[in-house]
Image: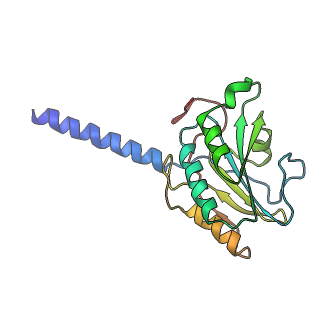
Amino acid sequence: MRLAIGLWLVVMAGGFAWLLNEQNRAGAPASPPAVWPEASRIAHGKGRFTLLVFAHPKCGCTVATLRDLERLLAHAPRDLDVDVVFALPAGAPPDWSRTSLTRTAREIEGVTVVLDPGQVEARRFGARTSGQALLYAGDGRLRFAGGLTPGRAHEGDNAGCDAILSQLTSPSRPAATTPVFGCALADRPGPGRTR
């Protein structure tokens, strides 16, 4: 009996350690251009900040990103344009992007949802992980690259939202980066995928 209980405790500890590691394992960081690319079909308002959030429409981890984005916008100045860019694989059927995530993003006040067939914009901006946020200033220069959550599929206070608010209120601050937590934007199976 003691052996069974000891084995059970070892399995439970291992499972807990695996979950903790998954929550804190950052995705691949973006390699964004330092200046807004002129070829982008996403509008960038001159003289206004633009926040891009790249998302996989079937990544369950991104629910936390959208919730933290909504909280961020409640505290952000109004001279901010926000686009949630859903990266779609080439040849995806028309209904592929109709998910609870795209519906949630459309319901956030002040957010424009952009569908990105073939992941053209995601590649143009160097985004590789769902939840990747990029903040560009009104002059088109990159001011922030990172995530909006404290961990994979976890929401709450985090360094990414704090860094964005700092940039919006004190644009002379140095550009900032934080880890991004989410699934790969490329369409392949991964943890947290939903329909």
Q: Quadrant of the C terminus?
A: top right
Is residue 56 in view from this perspective? no
Q: Position of residue 162 (x, y in %)?
A: 59, 66
Q: Position of residue 139 (x, y in %)?
A: 85, 66
Q: Quadrant of the N terminus?
A: top left
Instruction: Tell me which residue sits at (84%, 66%) in the image.
Output: 47
Instruction: Tell me which residue sits at (70%, 40%) in the image.
Output: 86
Q: Position of residue 9 (x, y in %)?
A: 22, 40
Q: Nearer the viewer, residue 78 or 59?
A: 78
Left or right for 102, reference 150: right
Q: Nearer the viewer, residue 41 or 39?
A: 41
Is residue 74 in view from this perspective? yes
Residue 138 picture quarter: bottom right
Residue 148 picture quarter: bottom right
Left or right for 30, reference 64: right
Instruction: Tell me which residue sits at (43%, 47%) in the image.
Output: 21
Left or right for 94, reference 183: right
Looking at this view, name the residue that lies furthest to the left. Answer: 1
